Image (cartoon, helix red, strand yellow):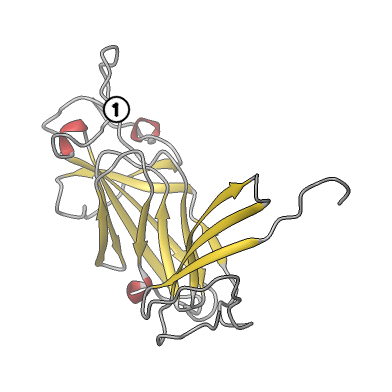
Amino acid sequence: MGNRAKWFSTAVFLIISGLVFCSGCALPAGRAGNRQTINLNGTWETAEGNMDTIPQSFAHKAPVPGLVDMSEPEFVDVGRKSDKRQAFWYRRMFAVKGEIPASAILKIHKARYGTKVWLNGQLAGEHLPCFTPALLDVRKHLKGTGSQNELIIRVGANRESVPEGMPSGWDFEKYLYIPGIYDSVELILSGSPRMVNIQTAPDVDSKAVRVVAEIENMGEARQADL
């Protein structure tokens, strides 16, 4: 490595079902399983309607990522308040090969205004922020072994669909606020435990880096030795 500094790591692990903190420890091999990400981007069916009732039909199509004004055929008065609708709805079908593993997280990277999700007719969760990802645990509603899954996502039709004080992108120069799923959608499948979050903080003077890892265990609580 020449004159380059040699680094060592200090890790702090948080296991949700049974608190475990360890320094430089390793999880037993084979516990975590393989991680698989299913990309759900592409052409989705779309419709307009009220905030709470899933439409009977989806006669339009729009790209994800994208905005509702990209739908074909187009909707009228998108971005303005209209008596025609309170919300826009997205729908698509997908399948998962094999059995569903211990963890199944639906990640909607960004959508506006106010996101609500149904999977196979069951409410999976809600996410109000317009500029941060929605991470929803959908395992109990998800079908595996090649069966078809129906995913429906509702977004509010305008900025007033989210509570006052929720950042919605207001700007002096804008006159249209167009909703939609404007970033990727993916299904993240993994075993247990799963890595939730990692942060690192380097200490150059001591030639060290501190790694803080949050780990979620969906099985029985376990203890790792230091």
SS for callout 1: loop
Numbered marks: total: 1
In the depicted view, which residue is nearer to us: 158 or 198? 198
Q: Left or right of 96: which side holds 129? A: left
Report x, y in % for residue 160. 15, 33
**Which residue extends farthest left?**
83
Q: In which quarter of the image is residue 171?
A: top left
Which residue type carries mark 1?
Gly
Q: Left or right of 211: which side holds 219? A: left
- Where is mark 1, residue-wise? 169
Q: Determine if residue 85 is in view.
A: no
In the depicted view, which residue is nearer to us: 125 or 212? 212
Say which residue appears at 41% left-offset and 75% top-offset: 143
Q: Left or right of 104: which side holds 2? A: right
Quadrant for the C terminus in the image: bottom right
Q: How many neighbours does mark 1 have within 10 angstroms: few (below 14), some (14-19), or many (20 or more)?
A: few
Q: In this view, does 64 lie above or below 200?
A: above
Q: Quadrant of residue 164?
A: top left
Say which residue appears at 81% left-offset and 46% top-offset: 4
**Which residue extends farthest right?**
2
In the depicted view, which residue is nearer to us: 33 or 26? 26
Report x, y in % for residue 11. 55, 65
Q: Determine if residue 223 is in view.
A: yes
Q: Is residue 22 above or below residue 177?
A: below
Report x, y in % for residue 97. 54, 74
Say which residue appears at 42% left-offset and 55% top-offset: 107
Say which residue appears at 41% left-offset and 48% top-offset: 44
Q: In this view, does 3 lie above or below 152?
A: above
Q: Left or right of 61: which side holds 54? A: left
**Which residue extends farthest front?**
206
Q: In this view, does 38 lie above or below 50?
A: below
